[in-house]
Amino acid sequence: MEEDKLGFVTFYHPGAEHRPDSKNAIGWNAGKHKRKFLRQRGHYIDSATDEKVHEDTLYFWGEWEPESRVVRISKPVPNGPHYIYSPYYVPRTSYLAVQNTDPYVFGTHFLYTCCQQFKKKGLTYKPQPVRYLSKGSVIIFGSHKAGNFILDTVFVVGGYTDHNFSDYRIKLRNKVTTTYMDVSLKPLYERGDEACQGSKTKSVDICRQGYSFRLYYGSNYEEKNRLNGMFSFTPCLVGPAGESGFRRPVVDINHSSVISASQKQGIKVKELKSLDEAKNLWLEIVDNVLTQGCKLGIYLEEPSALVQGYSD
């Protein structure tokens, strides 16, 4: 097993905005990963040193692949969203063809597992640096747009649990919610279980060969378990200010080893020497977000499970 390392990770994932299936709703995504501009009740702070936590309706960019109610934005801002998505999900009997949500920014802790933790090399998969991150590592999730890295999630590693196809139900049973199990873990593992009759998907190959993923728990602001003062957050706007949407903040820091203007997918990892080095980079990201007019969303209510689907 490789040694855990402290790192700063720039994580490039697909940045295109989802388009609804109908006027008022979108079903569980079975295609490529995309982003949604989401609306959910939650908590936010005005700065990294703000001791007062505010509660309101938060508007933010993120990943939510299950169902959502949809409202079209009548006057979108430049480079902003065209729709507002209110997330929910319908539990399924089969996860064969649907996408999982990763990272997951809802509930007590942000969570991240599986994506980009392995890269195929020949007939096997090679673990990537994000598979072995130590506490205090910082991951910034975002997308490439016009030469810029546009940000949707800041994740500070507060802990982790390793898991695989054989043991995830036992190891993670009391560490994650039913919602997370349904929208993130079951689409990852059970689609592989059902598809094992000859399918050649990545998830099936990894399941068959016994690869182990790592579930990371984000350092949480409100529980005061911050590492060197750092915590996970999502850039957001609050209340009526968010109803027209906003452009995802551009990360502009003077570290060529951290941000690449040309990279469009995958990961870029800078190994760090200390938590103070991680904190300095984290503070630069915070400053980028705040100077571009966003708040720091630190908690988002988990979406509800509906026994029957939403109808227009």
Image (tube, rainbow, N blue to C red):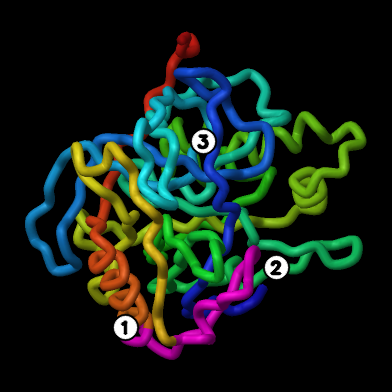
Determine the secondary structure under disc 2. strand
Residue on which the image places disc 1: 280
Number of on-image labels:
3
Marks 1/2: CA–CA distance: 28 Å
Q: Horizontally, is 265 left or right of 294 in the view?
A: right
Question: For residue 4, what is the image quadrant?
Answer: bottom right
Q: What element carries label 1?
A: helix
| Residue plotted at (74% across, 46% down) | 203
Q: Is mark 3 on a helix, strand or loop?
A: helix
- Give, as a three-letter code, the residue at label 1: Asn
Q: In the rendered view, tell whether residue 86 sits above or below residue 231.
A: above
Give the vertical position of 169 relative to 285 (above or below).
above
Inter-mark Cα distance, 3 to 1: 34 Å
The amino acid beneath tag 3 is Met
Q: Earlier in the sequence, mark 3 or mark 2?
A: 2
Instruction: State yes or no: residue 267 in magenta.
Output: yes
Disc with the residue nearer the chain's start (1 vs 2): 2
Q: Nearer the viewer, mark 3 or mark 1?
A: 1
Q: How crowded is mark 1: few (under 14 residues within 10 Å), some or many (20 or more)?
A: few
Q: Nearer the viewer, residue 57 or 113?
A: 57
Residue stretch rendered in magenta on the structure: 255-277
Residue 48 x, y percent position in the rendering: 19, 67
Q: What residue sits right under mark 2 in the picture? A: 127
Q: Mark 2: few, some, or many residues within 10 Å (few <14, many ≥20)?
A: some
Quadrant housing the N terminus:
bottom right
Residue 39 placed where, x, y %? Answer: 33, 35
Q: Name the residue under label 3.
A: 181
